[in-house]
């Protein structure tokens, strides 16, 4: 859908803008990937030992995981893709929208809100995610 493609280009602009100023990407999905990768390794180890516990608690601790995929604690792009992107995502990455955006959130209803300053970002988080 066209709205989704437009959002991809806007998200791409946020990533490009942050990379230009050496700002951490702070992308939740890469940090969640890092957490799940570590959780999976732990799962395999505990399953082998017969101590499998299916409860994997997700909380703010995943933002502190030591992993090259954690874009909250590492600058730049992760070392490899975390998913298999479709052609629209590849085009958006190669051709970001021209914006000054540095932040975005996805609301519980699937809308993406973009802004270029932290004050607005905090307001958006409080308005749409709390």
Image (spheres, grey):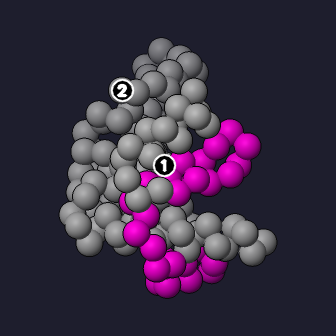
Q: Residue at x 29, y 33 (%)?
A: 64
Query: Cβ–Cβ below 8 Å for labels 2 and 1?
Result: no
Indicate the position of residue 104 as horizontal and vertical percent values: 50, 53
Indicate the position of residue 50 as horizontal and vertical percent values: 49, 17
Indicate which disc residue 79 carries. none
Q: Secondary structure at mark 2?
A: helix
127 versus 121 height, above or below: above
Q: Which residues are magenta?
A: 87-114
**Which part of the image, by quadrant, shows the C terminus?**
top right
Q: Quadrant of residue 88?
A: bottom right
**Which part of the image, by quadrant, shows the N terminus?**
bottom right
Indicate the position of residue 70 as horizontal and vertical percent values: 33, 47
Indicate which disc residue 61 carries. 2
Instruction: Indicate left or right for 106 with 108 as reference.
Output: left
Q: Residue at x 75, y 75 (%)?
A: 2
Nearest the eye: 20 or 123: 123
Question: Is 106 part of what is drawn in magenta?
Answer: yes
Q: Secondary structure at mark 1?
A: helix
Indicate the position of residue 18 as horizontal and vertical percent values: 32, 64
Q: Is disc 1 surrounded by few (<14), some (14 to 19) or many (20+) residues within 10 Å?
A: some
- Which numbered disc flags the more N-terminal residue, 2 or 1? 1
Residue with the mark numbered 1: 29
Nearest the eye: 19 or 35: 19
Question: Is 66 part of what is drawn in magenta?
Answer: no
């Amino acid at each position: 859908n066209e709205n989704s493609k437009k959002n991809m280009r806007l998200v791409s602009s946020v990533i490009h803008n942050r990379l230009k100023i050496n700002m951490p990407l702070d992308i939740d999905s890469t940090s969640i990937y890092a957490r799940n990768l570590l959780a999976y390794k732990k799962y395999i180890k505990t399953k082998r030992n017969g101590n499998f516990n299916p409860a994997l608690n997700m909380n703010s601790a995943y933002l502190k995981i030591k992993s090259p995929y954690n874009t909250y604690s590492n600058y730049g792009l992760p070392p490899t893709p975390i998913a298999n992107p479709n052609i629209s995502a590849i085009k958006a990455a190669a051709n970001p929208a021209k914006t000054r955006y540095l932040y975005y959130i996805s609301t519980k209803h699937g809308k993406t809100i973009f802004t270029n300053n932290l004050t607005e970002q905090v307001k958006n988080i409080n308005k749409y995610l709390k």
